[in-house]
Image (cartoon, coloured by chain):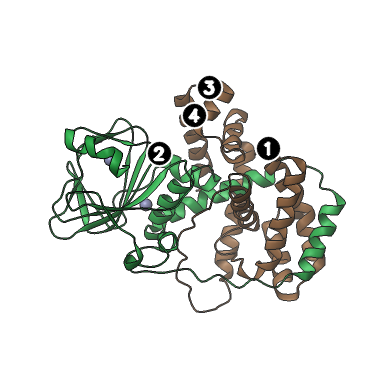
Chain colours: A brown, B green
């Protein structure tokens, strides 16, 4: 399916940044907005706030499309980081300190081998995530959906903290293993 | 060469947006100086992206799309925001201080030690510490988590040495007396989510005044 193909979304991003292509933007919106909204609602926002954040994030995607670097992140990772930061701003009402930017090299076309390598890794990661045993996948999701600490996840799931830490670690090890 | 790194828990929580502002600042400061943890944080972001797109889609109203389209038609392309930079303070810290080392508003904490509390929300406290060469931070334990990232000089804690970029992760179980290296005054960022517990009577008396 084209939606699972990371290269397809990189092409849409290029159409947006180079041609301000609204059709490409609508395609991006229709794929990412419903997932982002559900992600936000599972992290505690109500319907109206989730849609407000979606609108905000997608507008930022349009305005910053030329800053997207396909050798550094997949489109879904990039959009995730924008949505995460907006959630911290609006729901947790705090600033999100970001690391210093890496020094920029001379303006150049991204290296195609790097772009393709990252695409393949992202596809493997998606596949590895859905192949995780359900218990491990749910804990990883909880860690990302909520403002839940491992301790709070313990309270919510009734699992002892040690089990959760080792289960998340196990899941991450498996993800890493599947990637190498 | 950085020897002391962030834990996996902290990297994942930072990527998930689950840390309080002051701890995020310590993580962002270390990542600014450490390529290894930067790479790890970016891979946790990739997990976040994969989790987000694997979520069951929630229907989005037509007005959300039409409002967004109206917004982008009015929107200008956004130029990258230039970040503040300083030789000692990485960008995220320079932004809290409002510039370089000369902009830090130090307050004496006694025995030559100076501190400057940074403005974050109340969940945890971030402070810059200035420890004269050879001076010890009084022996103390922690009520919670303490992250200390070195920006200048170095300190020793037992047989470990922490230099620029290194981060010490001290939990409730840890009792320690960090000592600044004799060669240079030490500047570090220390973040705590609970007041430190001092052992000696003098620092304990001073604690309410210092706010440490
Ligand atoms: Zn590191
Ligand atoms: Zn300490």
Q: From the viewer's perspective, is residue A64 above or below residue A42? A: below
Q: CA distance from mark 2 to mark 1?
A: 27 Å
Q: Is residue B186 above or below residue A128?
A: below
Q: Which mark is residue B193?
A: 2
Q: Is residue A22 above or below residue A119?
A: below
Single out the mark in the foreground, 2 or 4.
2
Name the residue that disc number 1 marks: A42
Number of numbered labels in the structure image: 4
Q: Secondary structure at mark 4?
A: helix
Q: CA distance from mark 2 to mark 4?
A: 15 Å
Instruction: Measure the C-alpha gap from mark 4 to mark 1.
Output: 18 Å
Say which label, 3 or 1, has the lower sequence index.
1
Instruction: Name the residue: 77% across, 70% down.
Output: B74
**Which of labels 3 and 4 is toward the front?**
4
Crowding around mark 1 (Cα neighbors within 10 Å: few <14, some 14 to 19, many 20+) is some
Q: x%, y% of residue A179?
A: 53, 47
């Amino acid at each position: 399916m084209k939606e699972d193909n990371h290269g397809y979304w990189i092409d849409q991003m290029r159409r947006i940044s180079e041609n301000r292509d609204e059709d490409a933007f609508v395609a991006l919106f229709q794929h990412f907005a419903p997932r982002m909204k559900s992600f936000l609602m599972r992290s505690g926002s109500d319907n109206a706030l989730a849609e407000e954040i979606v609108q905000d994030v997608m507008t930022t995607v349009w305005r910053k499309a030329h800053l997207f670097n396909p050798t550094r992140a997949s489109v879904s990772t990039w959009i995730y980081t924008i949505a995460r930061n907006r959630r911290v701003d609006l729901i947790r009402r705090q600033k999100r300190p970001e690391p210093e930017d890496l020094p920029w090299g001379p303006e150049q076309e991204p290296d195609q081998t790097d772009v393709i390598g990252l695409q393949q890794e992202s596809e493997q990661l998606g596949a590895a995530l859905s192949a995780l045993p359900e218990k491990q996948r749910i804990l990883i999701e909880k860690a990302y959906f909520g403002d839940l600490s491992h301790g709070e996840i313990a309270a919510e799931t009734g699992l002892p903290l040690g089990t959760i830490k080792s289960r998340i670690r196990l899941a991450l090890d498996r993800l890493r293993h599947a990637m190498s | 060469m950085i020897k002391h790194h962030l834990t996996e828990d902290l990297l994942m929580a930072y990527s998930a947006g689950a840390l309080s502002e002051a701890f995020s600042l310590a993580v962002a400061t270390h990542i600014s100086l450490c390529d290894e943890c930067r790479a790890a944080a970016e891979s946790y972001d990739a997990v976040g992206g994969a989790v987000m797109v694997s979520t069951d889609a929630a229907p989005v109203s037509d007005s959300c799309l039409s409002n967004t389209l109206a917004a982008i038609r009015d929107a200008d392309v956004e130029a990258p925001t230039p970040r503040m930079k300083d030789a000692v303070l990485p960008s995220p810290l320079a932004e809290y201080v409002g510039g370089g080392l000369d902009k830090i508003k130090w307050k004496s904490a006694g025995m030559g030690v100076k501190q400057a509390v940074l403005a974050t929300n109340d969940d945890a406290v971030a402070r810059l510490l200035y420890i004269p060469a050879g001076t010890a931070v009084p022996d103390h334990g922690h009520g919670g988590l303490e992250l200390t990232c070195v920006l200048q000089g170095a300190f020793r804690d037992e047989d470990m040495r922490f230099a620029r970029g290194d981060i010490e992760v001290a939990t409730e179980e840890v009792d320690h007396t960090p000592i600044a290296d004799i060669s240079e005054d030490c500047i570090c960022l220390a973040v705590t989510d609970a007041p430190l517990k001092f052992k000696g009577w003098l620092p304990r008396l001073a604690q309410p005044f210092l706010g440490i």
